[in-house]
Image: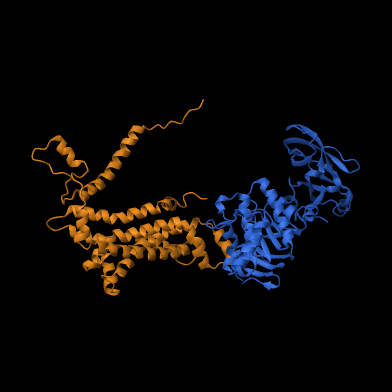
Chain colours: A blue, B orange
Amino acid sequence: MAGITMSNLCKRYGSTSVIEGLNLDIHDKEFMVLVGPSGCGKSTILRMIAGLEEISDGEMKIGDRVVNEVHPKDRDVAMVFQSYALYPHMSVRENISFGLKVRKMPKDQIDKLVNDAAQALGLSHLLDRKPKALSGGQRQRVALGRAIVRQPSVFLFDEPLSNLDAELRVQMRAEISSLQKRLEITSVYVTHDQVEAMTMGHRITVLNAGIVQQVGSPLELYETPRNLFVARFIGTPPMNVLEGQICESGTQIETEALTLPLAGEIEELGKRYRGKKVVVGIRPEHITSEAEAGKPGTALETTVDVVEPLGHEVILHGRSGESRIVAKLHPHHIPRSGEKVQLHCRCDKLHLFHHETELRLD
Amino acid sequence: MSRKIKDESSPILIHVVLITFTAMTIYPLLWVLTIAFSGKQSLAIALLPENPTVWDRLRAIIPFPETVSLANFIEVITEKNFLVWMGNSAIVATLTTLLGVFLSCTAAYAFSRFKFPGQRAGLMSFLVSQMFPGTLMMVPLYIIVVQWLNLGNTFWGLILVYSTIAIPFCVWMLKGYFDTIPIEIEESAIMDGASRTVIFFRIILPLAKPAISVTALFSFMAGWNEFIIASLLMEEEKMYTAPVGLKFFVGEHATQWGSFAAGSIIVSVPVVLLFMYTQKYLVSGLTAGSVKG
């Protein structure tokens, strides 16, 4: 078992820099999710851990060993690819055992390991089939089997669920999580889907343009996003963002859509930043159709654009003045588009960010 | 109400055109078959009497022998060294195929997967070499193979030349196919601990079977059917390949058309069999890369 340490890691293609000075610690036995939009460098980091991409600068350690110059096969790392990357001409058994065969493991030992892995993943009855005769979920399991059979120190997952349909994705999500918990192998999981990140990771690293935005537990990221990017990226639907100014008294924020009295923990902030321009973030679930008793709130007049009834809740997209508002409402009353509704905004649940640096105000 | 999409063009016209072209292609082949099985050495299907009737004239163009006989085949096999020549052709074509395909596979893999100086220039030079007519190469080839390498009148001389001729096409064909094999499969094998050699032989080559079949067939045909270079390099009669041997039937004063036709048919049988055997791979090999997935 091993943790992974990246110090001042850089990746450049010619004069183009993809990763610049990345520092990241992944603990032993941890399930770390790298999440970010397309092109943010998350897959590049994963491939550098795997050894499939050269490291331009900096240091990568797996356990106590610097692996910058170590060949992928000697890093004791297994990887699950987005496209499964199964060997199409080999049966499931041959696919799973290939890595053991090339490492010249005795045949009886290979058979035992393959059978154990197949049983753990429910593949025992499919061992003689070729990948083309398998469903997407089964192929994904074979790819997992190929990784776990080698009992590596580190698992790498490169968007392994993005080719599956929604239902299967939820199921496989749980399977991978429980597999990792059982095997206790350090895992790095790359995804652009923040729901996957939130549900699977012990910790999440949010990346943008090759730069780490925040590292933390899913709840930390959700409740105290370090900057506006993380605030917007984590959470579905994304956080509402309004530009405003804290009034001179420091007791309220005036935005174009509404005036928000400051309450709870952020009351103190108002006093510290009085008169300053800020960006206010409000999670959609903190905008409700009725005022919550005993909770500080303010009314928000909204014109409904689109309503998305999801059964257990309703997502409302609307406008308040020039500002776009998204709210998660209780489904007992579903407004129509064009309708003007009175919503309520929780004033103690606001997130404040610096107007220019976009960093969280604490 | 459902309406079928109607094709505007007339099916009759299309069929007339198709049948005409098919007939134009098949007729010469049927003619050769007729002569071969006629037991005679004449080029004519049937001899016209002095005052031919319409039926006589019609008979003279219907490609079916007046009497079916294997005499021409027996003569070709027994009276000349034809079986030796066939054997020579088989040796040359098989070794050309093995050498050509092996070298093409390794070269194409390198062109497909690695970045190196001269990669593009190398590929382009292969293409350029295909643009010159074969006869242009005869003199330099003769000098290189016979005078420099001293491989005149040997199988290796021919194999070397045929492989060189086949390799450019094969490299392009195989490179195109290798490009369609997802790189992740190889990366996955690298992670599994496989070396480049293991990946090449155990992952890439089995996956490229369709393209390899096409290139193998092409290389084999390049060696099997070639006449000009073989007649240039092979001096002794016992070293002739089958196409060169066939020229014995074409004399200065008289040509034994029957034997020539029978010989041609015997020569074409292995290629036809090979085509039939590799047919299932051919279509997928030739269309490789046209549709991703």
Q: Residue furthest top?
A: B1
Name the residue furthest left: B50
Q: Residue furthest right?
A: A294
Q: Is residue B131 something one can see in this rendering?
A: no
B51 sits to left or right of A62: left
State left or right for residue B293 relative to residue A320. Answer: left
**Residue sitting nearer the eye, A68 or A245:** A68
Above or below A245: residue B120: below
Estimate the x, y position of residue B139 in percent, counting from the top left: 25, 67
Q: Is residue A342 above or below residue A18?
A: above
Q: Position of residue A142 (x, y in %)?
A: 62, 56
Above or below: residue A43 compared with residue A58:
above
Q: Position of residue A128 (x, y in %)?
A: 57, 55
Q: Is residue B199 visible?
A: yes
Q: Nearer the viewer, residue A227 or B73?
A: B73
Residue A337 falls in image quadrant: top right
Residue situated in front as seen by the camera: A118 or B99: A118
Q: Nearer the viewer, residue A320 or A331?
A: A331
As displayed, is residue B40 above or below residue B114? above
Q: Residue at x 40, y 51 (%)?
A: B279
Q: Position of residue B181 (x, y in %)?
A: 51, 57
Residue drawn 23% across the image and 67% down it: B238
